[in-house]
Amino acid sequence: MGHLRVVRSAELQSSEHQARGRGSAPGEPPQVQLPAAASSSNMAEAALLALSKISFYLAGEAATFVGTKFSNLIELPNTVQRVRRQLLMMNLFIRKTGALYLSDELLKGWISEVRMLAYRVEDVMDNFSYNYLQYKKDQLLKKLGKGVNYAVVFSGISDELIQIEKEIVHVSMLKEQWLRPVQELLPTQVHNSELQFPQYSMPQFMKDEDLVGIEQNREQLTKWLRSDARDLKLVSVCGMGGMGKTTLVANVYEKQRDNFTVLVWLTVSQTYNSMEALLRKLLELTMADSDSIELGKKKSEHIDNMDIFKIKTKLKSLFGEKKYLVVLDDIWNLQVYERMRDVFEDSKNGSCIVITTRKEDVASVAPKNYQLKLSPLGLNDSLCLLCTKVFPYNNFEPEGPKKLKELATDTANECNKSTPVNCPAEVRELASAIAKKFEGLLLEQCPAELQELATDAVRKCEGLSKAKSTSELLDLANDILNKSVSLPLCKCQSEMQVLAVNIAKKCGGLPLAIVSIGSLLSTRKLIWPVWKQIYDQLPSELEKDAQVRGILNLSYYDLPGELRNCFLYCSMFPEDYPMPREKLVRLWIAEGFVVKKGDSTLEEVAEGYLMELIHRNMLQVVEYDELGGVNTFKMHDILRELALTVSKVEMFGTVNDFGAIIQMDRDVRRLSAFRWRKMKNDASKMKFPRLRTLMASETIVMSIPSILSESKYLTVLELQVSEVTTLPASIGNLFNLRYIGLRNTRISSLPDSIENLINLQTLDVKSTNITNLPPGIVKLTKLRHILADRYADEKQSQFRYFVGVKAPKGLSNLEELQTLETVQASEDLAEQLENMMQLRSVWIENISAAHCSKIFKVLSMMPLLNSLLLSASSEKELLSFEDLKPTSAMMHRLIVRGCWDGRTMRCPIFEHHGVNLKYLALSRCHLGREDPLAFLASRAPNLSYLRLNNINSAHKLVIPADSFTHLKTLILMTMHDVSLLDFGDGSLPSIEGLYITSLPKLATVPQGIEHCHCLKKLWLVGLHEDFKTQWKDKGMKQKLQQFENMGTVVRNVQAEGVNWVANRSSKT
């Protein structure tokens, strides 16, 4: 393999000679970024939005309306049709050619002009729709001829569209006039997309001391490669771009010469000429590794004359003879491996194939026990890696902090082993304090606190007589001091140390970004103003790094067209903001990014988009819900900066603070202004006539009325957690509005003009002061989601602590409604629900006994119902569930609050439908002497979440043996009758969270609890006063600690009176 050369980046570069061959300067990374493709992609999405508006116009009555009312505008539909054709062909042209010209500024300029035209078309079509609706409204009110001269208005729109058509023709001519002649002058290799990617490059390698934070992954990968298993192994290493996949694999790969006869590294990347060319190169590399260089060259000439059948035959022969290790680096398409896997013979000799990829669907081709998922570095490792780059000649050891921790622990142990005479208490305490400081130590804590402690230790040790001090203790204390002083950051001023920490945090644990910024800092003066400037400009500094830009851009440009806008949209949320899944899905649909596919709903298609972005490691899951689905997720900071850069160039949207908003371009189309807190007097003067989206959550909203009155094309209005108390009546003029988000605001009513929002899809007024919805809301037949309730008691001490809105008359008109949360029960609610068969989630409260039969019968008929909340009018109201017999097999989530008639759970919902339930929460359901756990174990065996709260039941609760095999969370709260809990053998094998609180009669430890091997969180709070003694006597702390060998460890056990909390987290 030759001498290993150290590279500066965390992702491996191509070899130098290959970089030169592709037009790069020596030492530069290959040109893998796709700037032209970026422009083409997003321009294409702009064109699609314009085309969708045109299609909507042509499909409606508006297409013939103008011609019949205004004879001079009879040609308008034909003009629109011609514009549609032009945009469509431009869109197709750009999609086909964009990736071929990866650095063509001329093409980028032309695409920019087309994009501007597409935006203008969208504006014109929205303007037409707005005035068309105003015309119809005035016609209905008999106001025509008394105000707006619509003949002039529509003539102006027609003239503008004709002008746009002329400009489209002109821009098309520019392409022929400039693009084609220039392209003919370009070298022929520019036209060959194969030369734009480092397909067959051999990676450079990094020394072990330059690798930080990958020790565990390196050990795991090495263990797999050197295992005694004889079968052919397929291993995958997955992670987002810049995470260090290639670095990790290359480091392990080079050390396998003694373990494998043949080692082959093939970089696939995004594009390859053909599968035949890929296999041809694989054969060439395999033969070169198997034979001498001279013989390899001769055979290479022969390979060029082989067809694909002979190539495959030869590869199978080579791989069948020897033990081989093949690395397929940077695979983007699952079919690449599937189409070449048949050449890898399994000769039962321990051969191995390693795949690196950014996409989880590709990684899943390997067995689960051979899949390695890389995560961002922690802050400690990030700081260590940063230091190795900032101080490259400082002999800084990345393992320094860990070694210091070991030294401090040794000091404490040495003191504890010594007799009181040899080790005074003050020294023992000091050494223990040093060790304690290292628990969860971050590198930024080393300089001040550690040096102070170490110096104190040395001083006290030196002050002791030889008879009282062991030389080992003194040596250890001195070693700690010397090691801490050698840390580079220790020599910096405290403000520099804090800045270094902030820089590391800003990189989000992405090795590629850390290395890039660290290398940059190493060339600058070690003074605060210089570092602060780099920190403030970190996104633009990363953008200058060709390799960082290239690697991250590849992920973005590989996205299908429909996902690019969705990805950019996520950058509209603040940094590290946990984005709720359902909210984002509804926003994407409102924006028009989601296209219906087959029989799937728009929501289902959007969910697919989201999962695709997650599987591509473009979004990171923050939290899963109780059923194992994605609940919240976030965008990595560096990817967000990439998205913001693209958004700015493509005029997709703007994220800014209020101070900069004042001078913002009036033509902004999407504006995110989270957490505006500072207002100025001229706030009311802000005007954004082309604004489509306003996201101003957690904001003072003095300027909102001005924005609403001027932004007549607004599509999304998100004001969650803002200080808004009213909405102006002018909101009714926003014909394009599809999403209104007012959750957790102080608004108490909605204007009646909301009935004019004929395109509204989502109305979210949860946790507001709204008691009634405007009666005209039933006219909004495109509504898909209504979320409305208010807190009557924020302390949740009352039974009806939350109250739904009253169902408006005519609710049944909303036949497309999928979500209805929360409405109050009434005599006619059942009748209104009969036509609403698209409902998926229904929350009904204030139910009385008289309502049960009718409402439950209607709910049972809903074929798509999957989530249901039913709450009684009071704690004493007896509800009969005999008529609740869901026909929907998708009804997985059930929440019931109130007393069950007959004090029994023996009813059809459990007897016939229980097997479909996965989430069950029962509250105030008084059951007499029935054991709900034993009952549900057989009726609802597939539950993954079970919550029982404030329930009268049997004194002894038993979970039968081998039951609740899927249950991950069990919550038992405020059950005053329960004195015994018994977990049968083999029960709860998947339990991760067990919460037992406010069971005052429970004096003994639940039998079998120590066998819950998957447990991560255990809460034992508010139990009998004897419980604490029982816990200690049975040695439960020690029994729980034994799970450390199974991948979990007891992190914390707290005792406060009779309140016990034990948290156990996995080792990660």
Image (tube, rainbow, N blue to C red):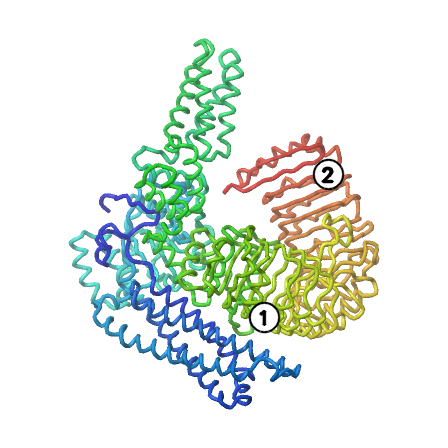
The relative height of residue 414 versus residue 806 in the rendered view (above or below) is above
Location of residue 335 in the rendering, given as x and y in whole percent from the top left corner = 39, 64
804 left or right of 878 in image: left
**Which label was assigned to residue 734?**
1
Q: Nearer the viewer, mark 1 or mark 2?
A: 1
The relative height of residue 1066 versus residue 338 in the rendered view (above or below) is above
Name the foreground residue: 757 vs 197: 757
Give the class, few, some or many, for how many residues have Cα within 10 Å of label 2's Cα (few <14, many ≥20).
many
Identify the residue at horizontal 48%, vertical 65% (top origin): 669
Identify the residue at horizontal 36%, vertical 55% (top origin): 551
Q: CA distance from mark 1 to mark 2?
A: 54 Å
Q: Can residue 567 be seen by looking at this rendering?
A: no
Location of residue 973 in the rendering, given as x and y in whole percent from the top left corner = 73, 46
Q: Which amino acid, mark 2?
A: Gly
Location of residue 763 in the rendering, given as x and y in whole percent from the top left corner = 63, 65
Location of residue 845 in the rendering, given as x and y in whole percent from the top left corner = 75, 60
Q: Can residue 873 be seen by looking at this rendering?
A: yes
Name the foreground residue: 588 vs 745: 745
Give the class, few, some or many, for how many residues have Cα within 10 Å of label 1's Cα (few <14, many ≥20).
many
Image quarter for residue 817?
Answer: bottom right
Q: Which amino acid, mark 1?
A: Leu
**Which label was assigned to residue 1022?**
2
Image quarter for residue 722?
Answer: bottom right
SS of the residue under disc 2: strand
* Total labels drawn: 2
Query: First in sequence: mark 1 or mark 2?
Result: 1
